[in-house]
Amino acid sequence: MHYPHDFQMVGGELHCERVAVRRIAQTVGTPVYVYSFRTLVNHLRGLQQAFRSLRPLICFSVKANGNLAILRLLVQRGAGLDIVSGGELYKALRVGCPPSRIVFASVGKQDKEIREALRAGIFCFNVESAPELEAIDRCARRLRTTARVALRINPDVDANTHRHITTGIAESKFGIDPATALALLRRAAALRGVRFLGVHVHIGSQITQARPFLHAIRRTAEVVIRARRLGVGLEWLNLGGGLGIIYKDEQPQTPQAFASAVLPLLQPLRVRLILEPGRFIVGNAGVLVTRVLYVKPAPRRRFAVVDAGMNDLIRPALYGAYHEVVPVRQDRPPSTVHRPQRYDVVGPICESADVLARDRRLGPLHPRDLLAVLGAGAYGSTMASNYNGRLRPAEVLVRGRRWALIRRRETRRDLIRHDVIPRALLK
Ligand code: LLP
């Protein structure tokens, strides 16, 4: 298969590696995120291999999936982490990620976060603006240290992806235009708290073609070359994340194809490479398992109301994203004729946008049937919320025949943990 993962039907039952998904659902309940250890490792290895000639630092993007077990297993296999907040820094350090493998992006870094990252000794700050650069310089000098930084270049390249996840066009809030970046690099000597390590570019997410990356690299390479002429020796190029995966019928590039497209541009630059993949590593390594509550016929539609909603997986509601939905078990008695029917798979949330999948041939479905929403590993659990008083799902990691809970289902107690009733004020 072009882009392999370890969820497959065996004897009419969906398995994750060697474990029947139904067994997990029966034990921990639904909704539950189920991840494959093998898929995660294979995707990381695929990238490490494809780019090995540049000895890349592959920093998994924590925002795609911040589960500690997942972060730990990737870090154990040589990954670094791409973080965007003090909270993610905390997680990165908790899983034992060497600070020398942490890179920190975000347009809104606060002094407190900058100081924490400096004290931890992270590898590099990806800087998004001139005032941010000054803030980092100031914090570093106060701590009597130097911050390693890479300027994030906005190359003004359209990544041809969903408008909510495109980040490299001039209108977007991300990065610094090449002219401003060069002006900042000219000031390098005056900024004693920072050392310019390289440049960073991230043009968007779910990009299936090499072309936008090539445009972005060309723009960024110009900055590197001109900076060197100014005497600023940039050694690293961080190409960000953005590698697309298959949700429906996309034909994304394999790591090898991606590498052979971009390596010819990178090699002459004599730079070390950083990549920040999120979706590529974890996207199809996870599914969201949900149970049918009701089958609801209506005049124009047939609904399968399930126990997972947009609070658990917001991608369909937020981006109109397509996720494949498959039955966890397909063993219908052979005597009866069952023609699939079309269903809208909807959650219980009080919002019309709470549709996980529209007009899908499934079933026929019955209450208590289990369904798996595929490709839910990236930006699934990290974007989950308690909306409608719902408890965020449990998460499970499968490795071969074994599996373990990696996040407990939230409890009612979690729902009210931070609320305060100020009795005097309400009197
Ligand atoms: N590096 C930077 C600077 C980023 O902003 C991102 C993602 C990544 C790396 C990782 O990108 P990936 O390899 O996963 O494409 N919630 C959206 C995606 C938002 C992406 C945000 N930035 C979704 O569910 O499609």
Image (cartoon, rainbow, N blue to C red):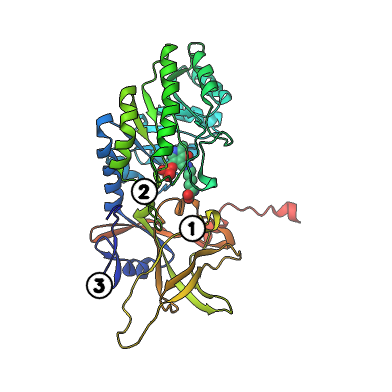
Specify whether residue 62 is in view.
no
Quarter of the figure that contains the C terminus: bottom right
Callout 2, which amino acid? Answer: Pro
Tag 1's secondary structure? loop
Pointer 3 residue: 11
Quarter of the figure that contains the N terminus: bottom left
Q: Residues within 10 Å of mark 3 (few under 14, many from 20)?
A: few
Percent x, y of residue 164: 54, 46
Pointer 2 residue: 252
Q: Earlier in the sequence, mark 3 or mark 1?
A: 3
Question: Is label 3 in contact with label 1 (beta carbons under 8 Å)?
Answer: no
Question: Is label 1 in contact with label 2 (beta carbons under 8 Å)?
Answer: no
187 lies above or below 100: above
Tag 2's secondary structure? loop
Percent x, y of residue 41: 28, 47
In this view, the residue in front, 343 or 410, is 343
Percent x, y of residue 133: 53, 23
Q: Earlier in the sequence, mark 1 or mark 2?
A: 2
Pointer 1 residue: 313
Q: Residues within 10 Å of mark 1 (few under 14, many from 20)?
A: many
Callout 3, which amino acid? Answer: Gly
190 lies above or below 304: above
Q: Quadrant of residue 423?
A: bottom right
